[in-house]
Image: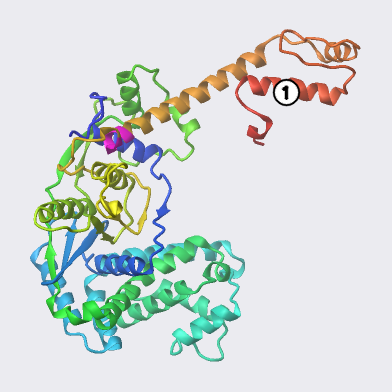
Amino acid sequence: MSETASTSDVSFTEQLYLLSTVVPFQGRRVNRITQRWLLGRMRLLDGIALLLCTGVKREAVAVTYESTGAGIKLFYCKNRPCDATEKSYAAGLLEIVKNAVLYENCVVSIMDYIIPECQSKIKSRLGKLVKEVSKLQKSSPGGKISVSPSANFDKHIRVTLANSVPSDMSMESFLQVVMDFAEKLPLDNFGLVGDLMEMTYFIGLARDIHTVIPHPALVWRLKKFGEFFGAAKNIAWITLFDREVSARKKLITLTEICPAPPVTETITGDSIQILNRFAESIGTEPVTLEALKTAYDDFQAPPGLPIEANPEAFKEIECSVHCELTLLVFMVQRRLETRKKQYVSMTIELGTSKSTCWTCQAYMNHLESCYATPINCDIPHKSLHDLHCVVSDYSGKITADWRMPTYCPEKNNWLLPGALVSIKIQHILAHIHELQQCDSEWELCSNEALPDGDDYMEMASDSDSTTIIGMGDIVTNGSSDDEFLKQISGLFLSGMGLNRSDLRG
């Protein structure tokens, strides 16, 4: 099934590019996992994916598993094939886990191993944390970030980080030290990097952290940096204290699933040109750049793109199948093949180093719909036969470098990413045209010849009910001037499909 929508004049990649500049975020959504065993497993898989992320900026890793009598098989995938060094690193990490004996020693061994190799990812997350700290310090009185530690938070930190917090240091001072520490941290000092990861991990675990640090963006960055330590901790704990895993840790294998090679796509023109080509292909009116900016305040064309004056300009984008979809397709085909011999569950858990994007989420929903058991089916435990794709959360982000897997059942095509992307662009056009229509109606009403104030007051003073200049039934009946004007203003607004609550400023 082609990922291109019915608008053949605008490619799927161009449509994605357009959405990425106009509405790049559709809202983050956390997968509300209520089963504790599944939540723990997803944290473990996400942690393994994070620790395997050793490459360049924007690299992503996905991990899944299969547990059989022969052992535990881990499968991982990146957006590109791994080189020999990366495969050797993954094998070395697995050996540490297999040879683990003591919990604390295992955590330290994992941290000592991953910090030198994951420098790119660590540097990226630390940079975002430092940027958030600097921004808050500049806007805070005296350059100090406001914090409000509680007794519970104080106890939590002093118990979990006993060696890091002097007994005479207040929590306010400790948190300021952590912020300063992050700003001045030398990345080549692996021991200090590990210490900061441990601190930020336990700070983020506090139940009242959002009350203690009333800055959601800063709390998010602290948690993201601490995830490295959390991953090492979860891996060590499951390896040594989970009975099923501990008994078979020597039988764990780790296999790379190679992704499909990337494809280079061409984007012709800029956002407004793509939008108007789309409008023409569906037979609707084009829009102006000013109208687009008015309708979407956050619209900003990325730098270095073609300008409006050059309609022939183009740029090339390398599009790849995202790693979680490569693994998902691999596991679905593997499970379907196995089912010919024996029953296996179709629940597939995917750990990721990054939150799953909007288009990946759309593809997962489509694939689930293709393998859903009919409602009237009499199969016992029907839900176990349905395909369930489990990830921790969705970022809601739309990027232009996304490519759909070649595996795509010919079913429920209206749920395909291409169809949903096309609908979203149609919504953008409809929204812009609706705003333009409202503006033109308002301008038309503003230019109509209306009676002056004295004429209004004279008509309002009549004792009989009066219809005024054909604007609808405005009953005066001796009502006050204020009530009369409220009726008139309400009439204009209702004619535009608005009410007073829609007015701003």
Q: Residue at x 27, y 53 (%)?
A: 380
Image spot of residue 2 (x, y percent)? 18, 33
Please give left or right for residue 390 compared with residue 476 in the image.
left
The answer to whether residue 52 is above or below residue 266 is below
Image spot of residue 180 (x, y percent)? 47, 75
The amino acid type found where label 1 is placed reads Ser
- Disc 1 crowd rating (10 Å Cα; few below 14, some 14-19, many 20+) is few
Q: Nearer the viewer, residue 240 or 265?
A: 240
Image spot of residue 365 (x, y percent)? 30, 45
Q: Exactly how many numbered labels are in the figure?
A: 1
The answer to whether residue 351 is above or below residue 300 is below
Dividing the picture into quarters, in which one does residue 194 lie?
bottom left
Disc 1 on helix, strand or loop? helix
Q: Residue at x 68, y 31 (%)?
A: 500
Q: Give the colour scheme of this rendering.
A: rainbow
Q: State the extent of the magenta-drawn residues as a range.
A: 415-420
Image spot of residue 321 (x, y percent)? 19, 47
Q: Nearer the viewer, residue 166 or 392?
A: 392
List the residue tagged with mark 1. 489
Quadrant the N terminus occupies: top left
Q: Nearer the viewer, residue 296 or 73?
A: 73
The answer to whether residue 376 is above or below residue 126 is above
Q: Is residue 323 magenta?
A: no
The answer to whether residue 98 is above or below residue 122 is below
One can see residue 199 in this view: yes
Please give left or right for residue 153 compared with residue 198 in the image.
right
Name the chief secondary structure element in magenta: helix
One can see residue 189 in this view: no
Q: Residue at x 74, y 8 (%)?
A: 469
Dividing the picture into quarters, in which one does residue 77 lie?
bottom left
